[in-house]
Every structure is written in C-alpha cells, then in structure tokens.
Image (cartoon, rainbow, N blue to C red):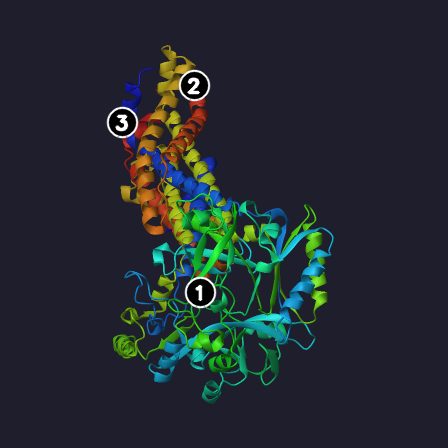
Amino acid sequence: MEIRPIISALLRSKTGAVLIAMQVALTLAILSNAGYVVQDRLAVAARPTGADEENVFFTRWYAFREGVDIPAMLDRDLELIRAIPGVRSVATANMAPLTQSGWNLGVSRHQDAEREETFNTAFYFTSESLVDALGLELVQGRDFRPDEVQLVEPSIANIEPKHAILTRALAEQLFPDESEYVGKTAFLGDSQFEVVGVVERLQSPWAQLERRGEASMIVPLRQLVAGAAFMVRSEPGQQARVQSDVEAALSKAMEGRVHLGTTTLSEARANRYRTHHAMAWLLLSVMGLLLLVTASGIIGMASLWVNQRRKQIGIRRAIGARRSDILRYFLVENFLVTSLGIAVGIVLALLLNQLLIQTIDAARLPLSHLLIGAAVLWLLGFGAALGPAWRAARIPPAVATRSV
Amino acid sequence: MFSYYLNLGLRSLRRNPLLTLLMVLTLAVGVAASMSTLTVLRAMSGDPIPHKSDRLFVVQVDNDPADTAADAEPSDHLSWLDAKELLSAGDGLRRSAMYAVGGVIEMQDGSNQLVSGMAVTRDFFAMFEVPFRFGGAWTAEADTRGADEVVLSDAFARRTFGEDDPTGKTLRIMGRERTIIGVMDAWQPLPKYYWLVGGPNRFGETDDVFIPLHNALTNEQDPNGNVNCSGEGPEPGFVGLLNSECVFMQYWVELASADEREAYRGRLGAYVDAQKVLGRLPVGERSRLLDVQEWMRVQRVLGDDTILQTLLAIGFLLVCIVNTIGLLMAKFSGHAGEIGVRRALGATRRQVFQQYLVQAAVIGFAGGVLGVGLTFAGLALIARQSDEVAAVAHMDATMLLVTLCAAVGAAVLAGLLPTWRACQTLPAIQLKTQ
C-alpha cells in the first residue's frame, strides 16, 4: 500500500484532518486522566474495613437525664441484646468504622516523643469484645480479659489505658524492626500500655488513604457518659430482623431515652464513599459521551471526504482499483489522522495531568493508562471510519463517466 | 435582512437533518456538562454576604505550643481564654464568640428529639443580618446575664409550631426551660459560613436553636464539635475546658469599614504581646484576621472534586466545539453551489458571512434549548455526590440565560472557520461545476 498519495491528499485539505486530530487529542487527554481518576476512586472505595461488614450494625442511644446508673444501664442493655435470637455477639463501642466521626489520639513508642514519632491513631474502646462484635481477625496474642476493663469518668484526662490490641498497620509503624508485637509497650501521652494482641486490619472511622486509615487500636475501657452505643453482629442473613428487635428492646428498656441512630456497616460504607461512586459515575458518563461525540465527528468528516471524492473514487475504480483498495485507502487515511491526534493527545494528557497535580494533588498518570486510551481511540477511529469507507468502496466505477 | 437570514437558517436545519441533529446534540451535551458543573462551582465559591464580606472577619488567635512547625496554619478555632478577652475588650462595630452545642428538646408528648444549636452573643443576629419572622434577638442585658432565652430557626419553628407565633412560649431545651424570644425568617447562608469548621454540613440547614453564649457556659453545655488540645491537656470537667488552651470557639468581628482592618490587626497584635508577657501564646504573632472570602478559601469550601469536574467539563465543551467546527464544515461544504449562485447574483462576501453565521447561531440556539434540559439532568447527577453538593446544585434564572448564551456563543465561535471557508467559494468555479 502506497502511503505517500494519502499523505499528499491530506496535505491538500488540511483543515478537516487537523480538526479531527485535535478532537482525538483532546479526547485522549481527557479520557486517560478521567479514567485514572475513576480507577483510583473505585479502588479507594473498595478497601476492606477488616470487619464482618455484612452482619454488623452500630446503634447509639442517649440517656440525657441526670442520675442514671450508667454501668447498670449498659449491663442490662447488653443482657437484653444477647437474649435476642440471631445475635452472634455484642459489645459497647465508642465509634464504628466508616462512620466518619470518633476518637483520634497520638500514640508513640517512647514517652515525650517528638511530633513526627507520634502516630495519629483511631482510638476504639469497649468493655466487651470488639474483636468478636466486629468479626476481626486476631493474628497475634489474645483478646481482653474482663478484669482488664477500666471504668473512667468522661474526660480526656482520664484516658490512661494499660492494655491494647493494635492493628498490624499501627504495630508496624510503632515497632518497625519487630515482627512479634505481643508484650511490647508504647505510650498514649504519659500513659504506658502493653500490647496484648494484634488484629490483621481495622479501619478508622474516617478510612483515610494509605496506612493512616488502618492505624487503629482497641482499649478495654468503659466511659461513664450518658450514652449507650453498641456494636451488634448478627448471624448471616438475619441483620434486618435483629436490628429492629434490638431497637425495640432498647427503646422499651428505658423511658425517654433518645435514639441517636443506627447504621449498618454496609450503610456506613455507602455513605462514606457516596462521593467516590457518584464521581466515578459522573466521569464514566462524560467519558462515554466524549467517545460518542468524537465518533460522530470522525464519521461526519469521513463522510464528507468520501462525498467530495466520489468522482476520484469512480476513476480509480474504472482504471482497475479493487473495492478493497478503496476501503483500505480510507482506513489508512483515518489511521494516519487518528495517530497524529494520539501523538498530540499523549502530550496533552501529560500536561493536563500536570495541571491536576498542581491544582488538586492528583497522582501521576501511569503510562499504561495512556496506552489503553490510545488503543481505545484507534479502535474508535477505525470503527467510525469503517462505515464511510465501506460506502466509498461501494461507489461504482460508472460514476467516473457521469457529468464532467 | 437579519430576519431573512434567520428564516434561511431555520430552513437549513431541515436540510441534512442527520448532520444538524449531530451538531445540536453535540452542542447540547457540551454546554450542559459545563453549565451544570459551573452552576455548582459558582454556588460553592459564591459570596454569602457580598455587601459586607470585606469587613466581617474571623479572628484566629494562635495559641499553639512553641514547638509548632513554622509553616503550620494557626488553629481554626480559639480558646475561651482568648475569646473572653476579645469580647470584653469590645473592639469593632459588632462581635460574637460562638460554639456549637447540641442536646435534647423534651416535647410535651414525650417525644424527645435531638437539636443542633449555636451558643452566640446578641450581636450575631445583626452581624450576619439574620431576618426575623417573629420577635427578635435577646437584649444586651439578657446577653450578659445569660438568660434562658432562645431564638428558633425558621425550619425548626415551622416543624414544631406550624405557622403560629411561638414567641413567649417556653420549651425544655438542653435541660432548661427556655423562653422563645425570636423566630428567624428563612435564612440559609450557602455555605453556612458562620460555622465552617468540623462538620460535613457546610451547606446544610441552619442550626435549630440559638442560645445566649453565657447561658451555655454557665450551664456547662459541652461543645458539639471539634475540641483540639495541644500542649498540656485540660483539667477534668467543663470549667477545666474553659480554663485550658483547648480551642473550640469561633470569634467573628464586624468592623465599620474595610479600611479599619490594619488598625484592628494592630490592636490584636498588642493583645498578643500582652499575653506573651503573661507567658501565653508562644507563637501568637501568627494570629490573623481573615475576611469571609479568605476564610472560605482557607477552609477549602470549594472541594477538589468540584474543581476536577469543572476542568473536565470545560475540556469536554472544547471537544464539542471542535466537533461542531468539523460538522459545520461538512454541512456548509454542501452549500457551495448555493453560495456560488448568491455570490454571482451580487451578494458580497460580508453578506454571505453574516448569513452563515446566523445559521450557526440558529443551530447553537437549538443546542442551547436542548442543553438547558440536559443541564437539569446533569445537575441531578452531580447532586448525587453528597448533600453538600445537592444543596447548591440548583439552576437559577441567570444560569439558564448563561446556558443559552453559551450555546449560541459556542456555535458562533465554532461557525467562524467554516463560514470563512464558505465565503472563499469562487462563484465562477461553483457555477461551472453545476
């Protein structure tokens, strides 16, 4: 196949070719960057919490009247919940994964550590077993014993834990040179605590990016606040019924108590990542529209070229060109224009990525996404040009003899 | 002549219907995508109180410990220690310290519910120009005394009392019988700039109840928001919190004019120096004043996602314009013969140019009309992101008009090159090939 005549024909009517190339370039730039953002968002939203998310819910109540015997109230509530059929495990808890509010404290290996050696840690506490109630995977050590539970007045100054279960991510940050963490000690402020167990994973309520989102610890503690919050894990498939039974039992147990809310971990997940999913859908729909628009542009321009050259096609056919020659001519022409667009588009994509890095701290675009984007546009160009090229190939040689 | 061109333009829509449809669709989706994101961008970066935003300031007294990183921002809130001093100094036209409170409202029928509230001083209402439906702000005397009075938000009052005037009635809110002294009229600043820190509800509803700051303090209402303690932690209890360097309050001051900013900043510096003598505020020189717009920028009211969407939409519109240029060229090239005849009959290039630009504008207008419809769909899609975005994702008359103009503008812009090329038609050659 001779490419030179195609190029020289293109050079004779540059405008259309340049427009198509420009459109392909812009499309590639947007497509690859948007595609990367979509992939990133979906990957972030798919990270596991470490809990048995399908079967856990978190219910919060507020006993605002003064003079309530809080430990008695909690013990009675726990009894009530345990008695409900289908409840696998229940524990008091100060917060739940993915709910986006809770406690965050600084933990360090040594007393008086510098700021950079203090790790922000999601601070879960319970007077029962959160390991059971959340369905966490205990990889080292043991769960808390009942005699380890501390009863404290509600002030941050009273938080002085003696025992803790860490997540693996936090343990690795605190003790970078170790692999066995049970028995190690660390500090929360001036209070020294001992690691009794390690769980594989437990995300913080905020599920931040990277390791911070998994830097969590659990402490055996019951705070004497006028609230009652329980993490309830039900037998598979019974969550909805268990939840309504628990809510009914708790509201009957005490007059005038305010139900602050109940959320399943699945709901909390949907809520936490609502923005991520919506953004992904938005970007995907724009990407789809973009491809449609570009395809329509290529079809329009290719049809125009075919129409303008009906006569020349007829002549070529009359002097011996086969249909496949004509078909190939238009496909190669389109391939050249698309390729030019892709070459420019790769540069544009990198520039756009640079702009995104500067304005919104986006990540650097990996090469693979550029290549995938380029492949998609080649296919799109080929597919869009196929129709007009096919019609060009059907032009009969007799056209050459009509009107001069 | 224009109406004749318009007529021709309308007729030409029917010629080559597929190409025309493609162009109209392309313009419509391009304009809709950019307009729906721009609507959100505009609402989010808008000025909630335009005539006053340059003389309404957040005062950040930085009480961070001495070992704070040099490039760290001052803490968003300030401590009661500093808020108390600033309030009693009485500097500025109006001033209010405030913090978020929450609690239970006990209804007659035993149905207790949570309410969100703000503890503010009386100046709050005048400073933020809160309109009242019934009653008004509490008196200065009630302010200092910390009276058991309450101002209800419009939505909360309607939920609880319907359309009736509830002023003078009492409600048991946060453990105390409080007299309703005023009911706001609809007041929903977007964003809720008076309290931006520590909440996903920056575009949410106005708080339910507003109570006197001193009442909240004497009754030990715990802050319903972030409490940040750096350095030495507080002593236990509410009094411990008040006497600590923990920050949980916001302090707003209204100055008589924007020119007074420097002078006020100077007096704030003097206050910091005086506190330094007492051994407080080791990095207090970083304290600052931020006006409403600066404060919204520092608080990043405009999310990264909104910026990303806007960039994306503008890029998309660009692709659509390029596409329209191509399609218009294809369309106009089919008119070469007609242009040849018109030129041969005496039309100037200028006239042909005008005629085809009007044609492009007609296509743009059709795209704009369709685009307005699609913009509503786009806004609905964007609103799914979060309640915050949903609160601002509404089309108003201005944006409607802008959408139409943008579509016509984009079409005319896209039409320039094809029109110019159409004008280059040489009548002789065209007539010969007929």
Q: Nearer the viewer, mark 1 or mark 3?
A: 1
- Chain of the residue under the numbered disc 1 shown in the image: B
Q: Is residue B39 left or right of residue A1?
A: right
Q: Is residue B141 left or right of residue B155?
A: left
What is the spatial separation of the Cα atoms under label 2 and label 1, in whole angstroms?
A: 61 Å
Reading the image, the residue beneath label 2 is: A393
Q: Secondary structure at mark 3?
A: helix
Quarter of the view holding residue B267: bottom left
* Frontmost residue, A102 versus A190: A190
Percent position of residue B430, x then y:
31, 30
Asked if labels 3 and 1 touch by Cβ distance under 8 angstroms, the answer is no
Q: Secondary structure at mark 1?
A: loop
- Chain of the residue under the numbered disc 2 shown in the image: A
Q: Is residue B210 left or right of residue B293?
A: right
Percent position of residue B148, x then y:
54, 84
What is the spatial separation of the Cα atoms under label 2 and label 3, in whole angstroms?
A: 22 Å
Q: Which mark is residue A11?
A: 3
* Mark 2 vs 3, N-terminal side: 3
* Frontmost residue, B295 versus B403: B295
Amino acid carrying mark 1 in the image: Pro
Percent position of residue A216, x then y:
49, 53
- Chain of the residue under the numbered disc 3 shown in the image: A
Q: Is residue B165 above or below residue B417?
A: below
Disc 1: CA contacts within 10 A as few (<14), some (14-19) or many (>=20): many
Q: Residue furthest top?
A: A320
Reading the image, the residue beneath label 1 is: B191
Is disc 3 on the same chain as disc 2? yes
Residue A310 seen in render: yes
